Image (cartoon, rainbow, N blue to C red):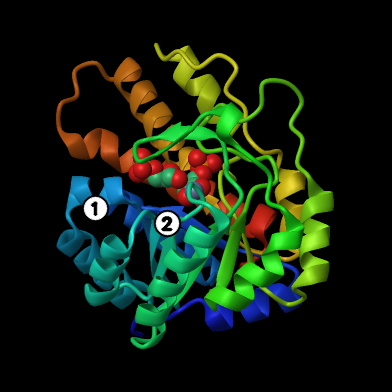
Amino acid sequence: MPLVTSTEMFKKAYEGGYAIGAFNVNNMEIIQAITEAAKEEQAPLILQVSAGARKYAKHGYLVKLVEAALEDTDLPIVLHLDHGEDFEICKSCIDGGFTSVMIDGSKHSFEENIRLTKQVVDYAHDRGVVVEGELGRLAGIEDDVNVSAEDASYTRPEEVEEFVERTGVDSLAIAIGTSHGAFKFAGEPKLRFDILEEIQKRVPGFPIVLHGASSVVPEFVEMINQYGGNMPGAQGVPEPMLRKAASMAVCKINIDSDLRLAMTGTIRKHFANHPDHFDPRQYLGPAREAIKEMVRHKIVNVLGCNNKI
Ligand code: G3H
Ligand code: 13P
Ligand code: ZN
């Protein structure tokens, strides 16, 4: 099966009260782990690539690896650009075979965000590619996304209708209190479901995207801390909150940090138990297996997108 867009996936997810997992990919093991779990659970899938991932693995390698996964699994898979910051990177991914791009204009003024998003939408739609926009700003620091807590702001529901109408975007990322990375909440986790509800009322049926949605799986944080790491206070979005979001208008849930934690925790544990190992397959194999089981758990117990092909 060739790559697909998310249009049908989101329609079914919205109606069915579940969400599609959008997992960040950087190398072969991560792609294999995610796609094998999805195949076994018969789950539609979004594989997303950040600017940092493109720099690390190179566009062509990632596209070929995803093509291999398509052949291997015969799943409906979307290849998506995560957090495209300008028209050029979106164009490069559209021209280079992606079926979906995100233009993240959230750091700009409302008017500039609309102009930029519409420019990408016009180019993408002419070529059968779908576009995710963003309104509101998440806090959090990762390679190419860096927003301090003071600069973060919730999405204003009163702006959503106009943004969707004037840009023609196919989905919208919103800020309701999640953040990127492994340290999402200083105290008790809190999400503004009232904002999500208000947005859902203003644009009924329109697919919403939740970024910063790793639950920062405690098992892997403990593993990292136990085997020489140092991540005290790491905290993610509790799974019941993700399930609630998935039952509402949220059709796409972005997960990256949990993949990183599963990989790092498993490799740290492996070396603690096998200090003599030096063949990368000896530690990348178990890491791939840990990611696969974590993704399976997300698909079945959190997102609810299993058996939805
Ligand atoms: O939201 C950002 C993603 O987690 C990608 O992170 O830019 O470090 O690849 P990255
Ligand atoms: P996490 O850091 O919570 O995994 O969020 C990933 C994300 O939003 C990618 O766009
Ligand atoms: Zn994100």
Between 161 and 257, the residue placed more toward the observer is: 161
> In the image, what residue type sits under mark 1?
Arg
Task: Identify which residue, 49 or 231, lies in the foreground.
Answer: 49
Specify whether 101 is left or right of 106: left
Whether residue 309 sits left or right of residue 13 in the image: it is left
Tell me which residue sits at (67%, 53%) in the image.
302
Q: Is residue 30 above or below residue 103?
A: above
Give the numbered dot on residue 34. Answer: 2
Disc 2 residue type (three-letter): Ile
For image coordinates 20% across by 68% down, the residue present is 64
Q: Is residue 12 visible?
A: yes
Q: Position of residue 223 (x, y in %)?
A: 49, 22
Report helix, strand or loop for mark 1: helix
Q: Determine which of the numbered discs, if any, sits on residue 80 in the image.
A: none
The residue nearer to you, when weighing 134 against 75, is 134
**Numbered tag placed on residue 54 in the rendering:** 1
Q: CA distance from mark 2 to mark 1?
A: 18 Å
**Helix, strand or loop at disc 2?**
helix
Image position of 304 (left or right of 252)? right
Q: Position of residue 170 (x, y in %)?
A: 55, 75
- Asked whether residue 308 appears in the rendered view, the answer is no
Q: Position of residue 180 (x, y in %)?
A: 52, 38
Q: Is residue 138 above or below residue 183?
A: below
